[in-house]
Image (cartoon, grey):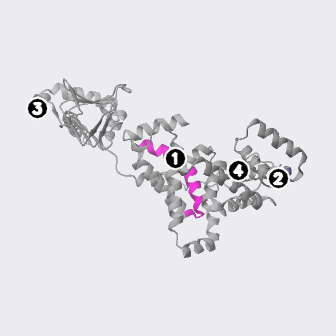
Amino acid sequence: MDQFIKEKIKEVKKGDQAAFGDVVSFYQSKIYQHCFRMLGNAHEAEDMAQEAFIRAYVNIHSFDDRRKFSTWLYRIATNLTIDRIRKRKPDYFLDAEIKGAEGLNMYSQLASEERLPGEEVEGLELQRYIHHEISQLPPKYRSIIMLRYLEEFSLQEISEILDIPLGTVKTRIHRGREALRKRLRHV
Amino acid sequence: MDCNRESIELMHKYLDGDLTKPEECGLRTHLETCADCQHHFHELKRTITLIKSAEHFSAPEDFTQKVMKNLPTEKKRVTYKRWFKVHPILTAAALFFILMMGGIFSSWSQDTQLVVSKQDELIIEGDTVIVPEGVTVPGDVLVKNGNLIINGTIDGNVTLVNGELIEENPLEGENLMASAGGVNGEFESVDRVFEWMWYKVKDIFKSVFSF
Ligand SMILES: [Zn+2]
C-alpha cells in the first residue's frame, strides 16, 4: 500500500490531479475520523479534514518523498484541529457540549464494524463509551493516545507529527494511559 | 522497589518497548510478589485493549468528490497527456497526417537560437543548459530553443520554450512531462510546435467528424 501511495504522489507532483483523488479516497476516513475525535463535532471535522487534503495538495512539492506520506498528512490535519480548538470561543464550547444529540446522526453512519480481538469488548454501546472517555482527555494527551493506539503510529512518528520531542511524547502517553486507566477501570 | 513510582514507571517503559533486560527482570520479580502492582499492570494493559476498540467513524460519502471540486485548477499540459493516453492511435494518426502536410517546420525553424537567462551558475553545453549538482540558481530561469538538465536547485520559476527537460534517469521516456524536482517555483514548458499541432489536430478532427 505504501508503494501505491508513493506512485500516486509522484503523479500528483507531475501535475496529475486525478491521482490525488485516489490518495484522498484512501485516507479520507482515517483523516476524517482523526479530526472527529479531536474536535468531537461532525461538521467541524469534515471542514478540517477537507482543508487538510486541500493543503496537502497545494503544498505537495514541499513533501519529501523519502518520508512517510501519512505522517506528513496527519501533521497537517492535527495542526488544523489544534488551531481550531484554540480559536473556539468559550460559548461555542458550551454549545458543542449541549448539542450532544446531534452526534447521533454521526453514529448512524458507523464505520465498518472492525471488531478487535479484545475479548471483553463487545457492543456498540461500549465502543461509544470508550470513544467518549478518550474525548474527555485534554487535547495534548488525547492526540497522542489516538495516534498511538487508534492510528498505530510509533512514538518516533508521533514526535514528528506533533513536532515535539520524543521525551515529551513519552511523558504524555504515560499520563494519558494513567488517566484512561482510572476512567475505564470499572468497565 | 517503590511501588508508587519506580515500578509504575517501569510498566510504562515496558508498554513503550523501552525496558532493558535487567529492568524487565526487576519488574517481573516485583510483579510476582506484589498484588497491587500486578493489578495496576493488568489494568494498564486492559486499558490499551479498550482504547483500541473505540468506536470507528467513516467520512461522508461525497467526501472525496468535495475535495476534488475544491482543488485549484490543474495544469494544461497534463490534460494533453491524459488525452494522448486515452487516444494513442488517434494521436499517432493525427500527428502523421499533419507531418505529411508539411510546411509546419518551415516558419518554425527560423527562430532557433539558444536564449538563456543570465545566471552565472548555469552551465551551457551546446544547446543544453545544466544546473550543476549542489548549486542553487537564484531567480527565474528561462531557456529558449535548448534543453535543460536540473541536477541542482532553481530558486525561482522555470520557463522552457521549445526545449525539453532532460532527466538523468528518464522514466518511461516521458522527458517532456518529467517533473522538475529541484525547482522551488513554477515549472512551465511551452512548446510552440506542440501547441500548434494540438490546435491543428483538434481543428482537423472537428471538420472531419464535426464534434
Ligand atoms: Zn508493587
Q: Nearer the viewer, mark 4 or mark 1?
A: 4
Q: Nearer the viewer, mark 4 or mark 3?
A: 4
Q: Magenta segment: does it hold A27?
A: yes
Letter of the chain that mark 3 sits on in the rendering: B
- Of B200 and B138, nearer the camera is B138
Among numbered discs 2 and 4, the one appearing first in the sequence:
2
Q: Which residues are magenta?
A: A17-42
As drawn, the label of residue B45 is: none
Q: Magenta segment: does it hold B36?
A: no
Q: Amino acid at mark 1?
A: Ser
Q: Residue under circle 2?
A: B3
Separation (CA) of disc 2 from disc 1 = 49 Å
Where, quadrant-wise, is the C terminus of chain A in this rendering?
bottom right
Visible in this render: residue A28?
Answer: no
Label 2 CB-ligand 1 distance < 8 A: yes
> Do residues under tags 3 and 2 come within 8 Å of each other at their CB atoms?
no
Q: Residue under circle 1?
A: A25
Q: Where residue B155 appears, x then y in whole percent? A: 30, 42
Tell me if mark 3 has few (under 14), some (14-19) or many (20+) residues whose alpha carbon lies within 10 angstroms of its own.
few
Q: Residue under circle 3?
A: B111
Q: Residue at the bottom extreme? A: A91
Q: Quadrant of residue B176?
A: top left
Determine whether the residue tagged by mark 2 lies in a helix, strand or loop.
Answer: helix
Tell me if mark 1 has few (under 14), some (14-19) or many (20+) residues whose alpha carbon lies within 10 angstroms of its own.
some
- Of A178 and A93, nearer the camera is A178
Letter of the chain that mark 1 sits on in the rendering: A
Q: Are marks 2 and 4 on the same chain?
A: yes
